[in-house]
Amino acid sequence: MIQTDILIIGAGPVGLFTVFEAGLLKLKCHLIDSLPQPGGQCSEIYPKKPIYDIPGFPSVLAGELIDNLMEQAAPFKPGFTLGEAAMTIDKTADNTFIVTTVKGTKHEAPIVMIAGGLGVFEPRKPPIENLEIFEDKGVEYIIKDPEFYHGKRVVIAGGGDSALDWSIFLSEKNIAKEVVLVHRSSSFRGHLDSVQKVIDFAGSGKIKLITEAEVTGINGDGNLTNVVVTHQKDGEIIVETDHFIPLFGLKPSLGPIADWGFEIEKNAIKVNTLDYSTNIPGIYAIGDVNTYENKLKLILCGFHEGTMAVQSAFARIHPDKKNILKYTTVNGVTGF
């Protein structure tokens, strides 16, 4: 049995920063995550993608942000149970919680904080008959390392920010040998500046843009060699390529946590904005996993929510102690 003061479910950026805030109050944390490494989406989905709205960092790569958060949390020696999804939760007679993972690992804590982001993700796949045959053989649903596509021909499908951003990145940095962007409409859902940049790149030949079309077939002998693009006016077009990346987004799901008795609204956990507590005393939800009026799904908002939740958790764990806010500029940071 792993015992701790605060059990954090989700080792993404919000969960990692919460370790730091808890450590300042001498509260020990342990984190559970279904992924094999800390970082959540930042590590698993877009480690090389720049983030622009982290205070003090005009630009920081998602993977670098996680490295910094791990370094910041390190003095407080957090524990990790990685590669195991939290499955069940039980309450003991002395008001502590026992969380058991899919592999049977048990954790006990008086406080549980759900920081699971948008939950468990599955890619939205296009309805192509033999698509799964070519998965990891030329078909990918996320871009983890852009250098993987160095010197390769790439077909990206989609009309949102991810499709636009990666098309721009792979061509602007001269990583891919050829970038073809296929979208079923002539208008895009992404940011206007990204849309304009793609149009400009298409005009200069950096990107081959095919609109009002869809990828309807893929072919190869073991590995992908070409895709079939069906255009609304021109019919079928064969595009030779090494990689096909359909970026139609991810389908989030709360997974087993949805059955833990929380108030759920639109696939998110309702919380009290006083301290981001749930309807179950002793359990908090912070970051993208929660919902409340005027909720903004931003990492920096999750940092605030985790900070406030830790203050409330301290009061529950130590009802007889008065917590006096002490600035780190005065006291510094001391670990355990």
Image (cartoon, rainbow, N blue to C red):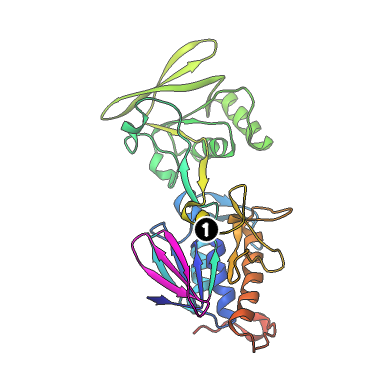
Q: Quadrant of the N terminus?
A: bottom left
**Residue 265 vertical position relative to residue 91 in the rendered view, above or below:** above
Residue 120 in the image: state x and y as whole percent: 47, 50
297 relative to 153 in the view: left or right: right
Callout count: 1
Taking the spot 34% from the left edge, 65% from the top edge, the residue there is 104
Taking the spot 50% from the left edge, 36% from the top edge, the residue there is 247
Foreground residue, 213 or 32?
A: 32
Q: Residue furthest right?
A: 294
Q: Give the residues drawn in magenta, as a range.
A: 85-110
Foreground residue, 82 or 239?
A: 82
Residue 113 in the image: state x and y as whole percent: 55, 67
Q: Residue furthest left?
A: 222
170 relative to 296 in the view: left or right: left
Amino acid type, mark 1: Gly
Foreground residue, 130 or 145?
A: 130
**Residue 135 vertical position relative to residue 70 in the rendered view, above or below:** above
**Residue 280 vertical position relative to residue 128 in the rendered view, above or below:** below
Residue 8 in the image: state x and y as whole percent: 51, 67
Is 70 one of the magenta-colored residues? no
**Residue at label 1?**
116
Is 104 one of the magenta-colored residues? yes
Foreground residue, 228 or 145?
A: 228
